[in-house]
Image (tube, grey):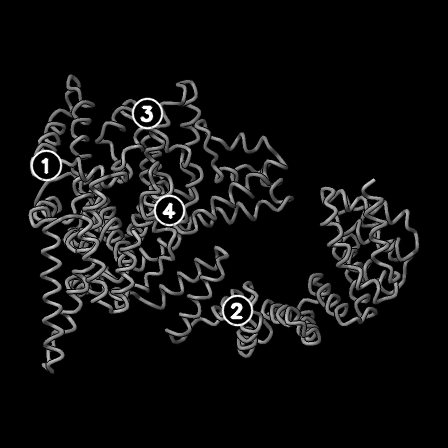
Amino acid sequence: MTIKNDISKLLRGKNLFDAFQKLKSLIEKSGNLSLMSEHASLFESYKYMLEYMTRGYVDPDRGAMLDRITNSIYTLTDKAIVEICSSKPTLLFYIRRNNRIADLAEALKQHQTLTDNIALCAEDTTQNLASLYEQREQFEKDIFHYVWTAFPSTSKDIELFNSVFASQNNYSSALREMLVGALLLSLLQVYDENKLVLLLNIYATHSNLGSEKSGTLALKALVCAVISMYRHKTRVELSQNVKERLNLLNDYADFHNDLNNIFINLIKAKHTDLISKELEESIIPDIMKIAPDIIDKAKKNNGVIDISSLEENPEWSKIFDSSGISKKIEQFGKLQSSGSDVFMNTFAHLKNFAFFRELYNWFRPFDYDNSVTYKTLKDAKSSIRNFIDTSIYLCDSDKYSFALSMNDIPESQRDMMMQQMELPPQELDNIEKIADPMSNKIAIVNSYIKDLYRFFKLFSRRSEFADIFKSSLNLFDIEALKPYYNNCDTIASVADIYFNARQYKEAAVYYALLFDSCDNVNPINMQKLGFAYQNQGEFKRALKLYLNYSLAKEDDLWNLKHIAACYKSLQQFDNAIMYYEKALEIAPDNIATILSIGHCHMELHQYEEAQKHYYKVNYLNENNLSGCRALAWCLLLTRDFEQSRRYYSKIMSLQKGETSDYLNFGHLCLAENKFEEALSYYYNAYTCLDRNANKFKEIWSNDIPSLIENGLVENDIPLILDSILMKLAE
C-alpha cells in the first residue's frame, strides 16, 4: 500500500510527527478501536519524550526509546494494513488468515497422535496407511497456515511455536522443517520480531545437537532468518532483541561459516535464470543444429534432457569438439559441480502436479513418510530409491517431481530408465566428499535455497509473494550481520560468482569493496576488477588497474593485450600498438594480436603498415576470414582494386557471404565505376537485411565517408543512393 511506503519514508527521515498523523488516518480507515488506543498511547509516550528533551533533561536511554517508538509505529502500520486487507481478502494470505483453525494446540496434538499411529501400523499391511497419511497431512496444512498467517503473534502462539521446536519434544522433522518455511513466508509478508527471534533460537537449539535432522533444521532456520533480516533491514536495526540474539550466536563455532555459506549460495541462486537461458537458447539449439538425434538420446523417458550424459559418449564428443560445443558442456559441468542450479529448467515443467498446488508442500522435505511417496514409490525397485537418495544435485522439490512423474512412465520403459540411473564414478566421489561435515552443510544450504528458488519462481500464486531473488541480496546491507561475516573471503567469493556469471556491474561492486576493506588482496583480483570495468565501457578505470598490475608482472600476456584493448577503445592507437607489440614479442604468431595492430594502423590511416600485418595473417592462415576481410578493405582504400577484388572473391568462395561482405564488394565495384555489378552485390546485402530499405540505407551511409575521404566515390552520394534504392525496389 502506498500509505505504508509514505510512513516508512517518513520514519527513515526521522519525521515521526508526520508519520503519526499518517498512521492515525490509516487506523481510522481500519475502524479498529484497539489500534486507535495503541496509537494514542504511543503518541503520548513520544510527546513526553519530546517534553523532557526540550526542558533540557539528560536521558541516556533516549536513543533506545526513540528506536522502540519508531519500531512500534512500523508495527502499528502493519497491524492496520492487515486489518484492512482481511476485511475484503483477495490475496491467499488474508484468505487463509480468515479461515485458519481456532485451536492450534489441538491440531498439534492430533498430528502427533496420527504420527504415532502411522509408526505402529507401518509394518501392518492390512492398515490403510495412505488414509492415515492424508489425515495427518490435513493437519500439517492447517498448522502451516496458522503459523504463516498468525499476525500479530500472541504470547500463546509463540509458546506453542516454541514447543514444536523444543529439542525434548518428538514432533516430526518434516513438520518442523515445513513450519520453518511458514515462518519465512510470514516474515516476508509482515515483520514479526517474535518469529524472527524464533528462527534464530531454532538455529541455536538445533545446530549443536549432533543429529543430521537437527543440523538440517538449524541451517534451514538460519537461511530463513537471514532472508527475513534482508527483507526488513531497517526494522532489524531498530531491534535490540535481535541484536542480542545475534551476539549470543557469535560464540557458536560454525555461525560465521554458516552465514558465509548462505550468502554465497543465495548469490549463486540469483544466476539460475541465466544458466537456464544459456541451456535453452544456446547449448541445446547448437546441438540440435549439428545432430538433432543426440538430444533425443539424451532425453530420459519422462522427457527430461540430461545434459551431463552428453559427456559420456565418445562419438558425440568428437562432434562437439569440432563444433566448439564441448566448451559449453564443460562449463555446464563445472557449474553443476560448484553447486549452481543447472536443473531448474529441466524440472520446471514437472511442477504441475496437484501436489504443488498446495503451498505447504513446497516446503516439505523429501522422505518416504507421506502419502505421495507412499503411493508412488512403495512398490518401486531399489534402484529408483537409490537414485533419489544418492542424487546430490536434486533438491527436495525436484525429488518429489521425479517421484510423481514415475506414474506417467509405462511399466515397459522403467527397466531401461533404471539403467540410466546408475551413478557415474565422479558423482559417487562427490557423495564421499559430502561426508565431510562442512561440505555436508554446504550441500544442505545449497539444496534448500534451490527449493526456495523453485517456490518463488514456479508456485501458481507466486505473484502474491515477495520474490527475494529479484533483489540484490547484498547481505552486507544488513548492518546487524556485518560483524559476523568472514568479510574478505566472502566478498571475494561473491565477486567471483558474479564475475563467472558475466554480471560485471555487480562483480565490480564486490571487487572494489574487497580492495577497500581488505589487505593483501590477491593481485589477480585487480585484473578481474579491470575486466569488469572494461566490460562496462569504463576503459580509463580498467586501464589504471591493468597498468598497476603490470608493475608487478610486466610480461603477463593477457594483461598486455587488455591494456592495448583499452588504449584502442580510448582511441589512443599509438599506445595500443605499443602494447600489442609487447604482446607479440611473447606470442609472435598470435593472429588476433596481429590483426589488432593492423586495425590500429588503419585508424591512424597508416595503410601500408596495416597491410603488412594483414598479409602476415594471410601468410599464417590463408583462409582466415577476419584477415581476408581486413586486407580486402585496406586494399580498397589504397585503390588496389585488383587485389581487393581477389580477396573479396576469396571470401565468397570460403563461405556464404555476410551482409558486410556483399556491401563492401559493392563499394569496390562502385569505386571501379561498375554500377550494375555493384548493384547486384548491394541487392544481396539488402536481401540479408530482410529487404529492409531503411537498415540498408543506414549501413551503406556509414561507409561512405571513408570512401569519399580516399577519393573512391563522387560527392553526389544522395543521387547514387537514390538510384540504388530505386533499383532495389523494382
Q: Are marks 4 and 2 in contact (CB under 8 Å)?
A: no
Seen from the viewer's position, the closer of residues 120 and 79 is 79
SS of the residue at dot 4? helix
Identify the residue at horizontal 77%, vertical 56% (top origin): 621
Q: CA distance from mark 3 to mark 2?
A: 55 Å
Q: CA distance from mark 4 to mark 3?
A: 24 Å
Residue located beneath label 2 in the image: 530
* Mark 4 residue type: Asn
Seen from the viewer's position, the closer of residues 704 and 630 is 704
690 horizontally vs 460: left or right: right
Q: CA distance from mark 3 to mark 1?
A: 43 Å
Q: CA distance from mark 4 to mark 2?
A: 35 Å
381 horizontally vs 30: left or right: right
Mark closest to the chain's N terminus, 3 or 2: 3
Q: Position of residue 304 (x, y in %)?
A: 45, 32
* Mark 3 residue type: Lys
The numbered disc on residue 381 is 3
Q: Nearer the viewer, mark 4 or mark 2?
A: 2
Residue located beneath label 1 in the image: 102
Seen from the viewer's position, the closer of residues 615 and 76 is 76
* Mark 1 residue type: Ala
Q: Nearer the viewer, mark 3 or mark 1?
A: 1
The numbered disc on residue 197 is none
Q: Position of residue 288 (x, y in %)?
A: 59, 35
Residue located beneath label 4 in the image: 430
